[in-house]
Image: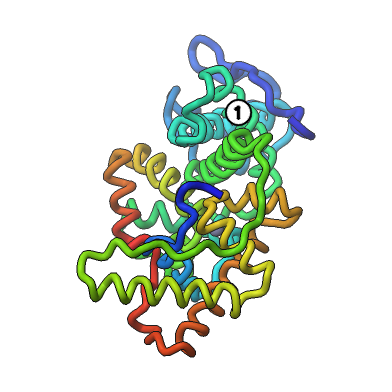
Amino acid sequence: MDGCTNVTRRPPDVTMTGELVGEDRPSRPLRPVGAPIPDVEWIERLTASGSVRVEAVAQLHDLMLRATRFQVSKMPEASMLGAARRDEIAHSAADEATVSALARLDSFEGRSRFTTWAYKFGILRAGVEVRRYAWRGRDIELHDVPEPATSSGSSPESQVEGNDLAAAVRRGLGQALTEHQRHVAVALLIDEIPIDILAERMGTTRNALYKTLHDARKRLRSYLESEGFPVDTLPKSAIR
Amino acid sequence: MNARSTLDAGTVEKFLTVSDPWLSCEGCFEHIDVAVESLLATGSTIDEPLRVHLVSCAVCHEEAQRLAELVGIDLGLGESESRRRLEDAL
Ligand SMILES: [Zn+2]
């Protein structure tokens, strides 16, 4: 793991009676074994020095590993990988996530639990690493717009409306968008290339590509409005 | 280009998804922990810019689902109930 030599697996210095030993013994009462670490304690220990911090970083890494293993186990892209490879990815992502979280510790405001805040780093890193692995060696070509498909609407009216709209969207992609916007929109929405993979291949960022997509969608809706499609009757969301 | 490289109804809908009010992927990452935990713990709604981002950004949406499932386990709600609550809030 780059630049993170503090992530080590060292058992806590705890005696059989549950007392912490050594020079970094905190003044607060001991927590029962297995009890959640209070958020304030996470921050105190992660910003401390010496063995207290080393131990806290190892616990943070364990938390990250929980998140990365969970994410890897849920991703269809990871299902083809062997168990050893999946675990390797989960560990590598947990390493990266630990470094990221430590670098952004000051952004934790206590508005969520510390564990929830930490999980998001693990989930992000595991997702990136699995997708990167799944897309390795695969060429990505940027395409123009395909022909509209025949609508699967049930009534003749809806088929006509669907085809009209699809044809107008196709024209809009060609006329209202820049070539860059068109290529990005087609790659993300038709070819379904994950945004972080596309960003990596195009030498840009996830944020920049999402902004390009945002601008493209706005231009497309404006074009459709100018073509006489009432904007408030157009679909607004891809999920609902 | 994959087998779904056509402008079918679902694809047209993806092109027309409204992504205003604007929020970047980075902004989404910044707020997602508080939003998901508040939604699951107290039933609070998701702020509109974040809701819109999750609807219009496939990868952030998938990561939010995963976070909801994991936090849901911690809160004793279970994975599928937590995912359902997130989807309902979108
Ligand atoms: Zn996003």
Residue placed at 26% from the left, 72% from the top? A158
Which structural element holds mark 1?
A: helix
Whether the residue under disc 1 has CB within 8 Å of ligand 1: no
Quarter occupied by residue A205: bottom right
The image quadrant where one finds the C terminus of chain A is bottom left
Position of residue A167 measured from the top left corner of the image (x, y, whole percent): 45, 73
Residue placed at 52% from the left, 51% from the top? A192
Residue denoted by label 1: A89
The image quadrant where one finds the N terminus of chain A is top right
Position of residue A30 measured from the top left corner of the image (x, y, whole percent): 50, 27
Residue placed at 29% from the left, 50% from the top? B84
Question: Which one is nearer the viewer's eye here, B60 or A99?
Answer: B60
Question: Which one is nearer the viewer's eye here, A175 or B46?
Answer: A175
Locate residue A88 relative to residue B61 in the image: left or right.
right
Question: Which quadrant does ligand 1 occupy?
Answer: bottom right
Amino acid type shown at disc 1: Ile
Locate residue A143 relative to residue B15 in the image: left or right.
right
Residue lying furthest right: A3
